[in-house]
Image (spheres, rainbow, N blue to C red):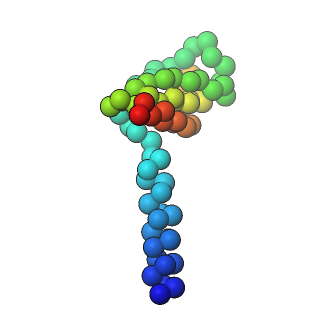
Amino acid sequence: MNKIAATAALAAILAAPAAFAIQPSAVPETGKLTKAPAGSTVEIRTSDKGDSFVNYYRVGNDGSLNLVDQVRQSNN
């Protein structure tokens, strides 16, 4: 019985991150920035399928944006 409980707990832990995965359709296409300093953080708000997202980017040395985090804000 303990093996079944341990297996179920492990499966729940491994499945949990999938619920919080980045939503690619909510990540906008970005170009390069010319006025933001390298290393700074930029916030871009988007929406997809009724939910809103806050996407956080780090500005690279060449002005490119690298996605750091995405926070989903459900409208339900």
- List x then y, in percent, for residue 17: 48, 54
Q: Is residue 13 above or below residue 65?
A: below
Q: Is residue 64 visible?
A: no
Which corner quadrant holds the C terminus? top left
Q: Nearer the viewer, residue 24 or 73?
A: 73
Which residue is at 32% across, 31% downward?
Answer: 49
Q: Toward which corner of the image does residue 60 lie, by quadrant?
A: top right
Image side of residue 32 versus residue 38, left or right:
left
Quarter of the rendering containing residue 56: top right
Residue projecting furthest to the front = 76
Image quadrant where residue 11 sits: bottom left
Which residue is most to the left? Answer: 49
Between 8 and 67, the one lying in front of the other is 8
Residue at 47% in and 47% down: 20
Residue drawn where x is 49% and y is 78% of the image: 5
Q: Which residue is drawn at 44% across and 50% down?
A: 19
Looking at the image, residue 23 lies above or below residue 2: above
Horizontal arrangement in the rendering, residue 10 relative to residue 76 (left or right): right
**Residue 4 screen position, x and y as percent:** 45, 82
Q: Is residue 12 above or below residue 23?
A: below
Q: Which residue lies furthest to the bottom in this view?
A: 1
Q: Position of residue 30 (x, y in %)?
A: 45, 23
Total labels: the figure holds 0
User: Could one spot residue 2 in this view of the protein?
Assistant: yes
